Image (cartoon, grey):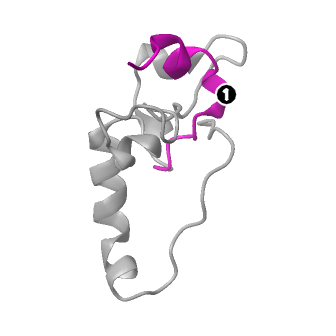
Amino acid sequence: MISIERGIKDMTDKNICQNPKCCQSNSLDRWNKKIDKYQSRKAKYKPRVNEYYRSVILEYFCTTSCAWNWAENNLENIIERKDCPNKILEKIIRQ
């Protein structure tokens, strides 16, 4: 049995959403009150925590919508083995 605490205890282990356009959505959970700006979210799941629901995509993206948008913008580069964007390590803040 998996402990729920293990999945939500330490949110800092989550990746940042890898879609650079994540911060463009005007949703309340993207709003940072401290800096008065929208920012990208963290991924939905921590890497390799949830053993029953294995969605590797949601270990790198906050929603399937963000994942699909990123894939649409990068699919040709991935298939052709061209430049692929670097992993985003810090939240993107919309200016």
User: Relative to 88, is 54 on the left or the right?
Assistant: left
Residue 31: % across, % down: 54, 18
- Indicate whether residue 86 is drawn in magenta: no
Q: If the image is split into quadrants, where does the N terminus sit?
A: top left
Whole-percent x, y for residue 71 in the image: 32, 61
Residue on which disc 1 sits: 12
The vertical placement of 19 against 80, above or below, is above
Q: Nearer the viewer, residue 81 or 21?
A: 81
Q: Residues within 10 Å of mark 1 (few under 14, many from 20)?
A: few
- Determine the secondary structure under disc 1: helix
Against 18, residue 26 (above or below) is above
Kindly identify the residue that appears in the image at 53 percent across and 16 percent down. Answer: 8
Give the residue type that dot 1 points to: Thr
Occupied quadrant, residue 45: top left
**Screen quadrant of the C terminus:** top right
Which residue is painted at 28% across and 63% down in the image?
72
Left/right placement of residue 81 relative to residue 83 reads left
Looking at the image, which is closer to me, 61 or 55? Answer: 55
Looking at this view, name the residue that lies furthest to the front. Answer: 1
What's drawn in magenta, residue-wise? 1-19
| On screen, residue 73 above or below 45 | below
26 or 68, nearer to the observer = 68
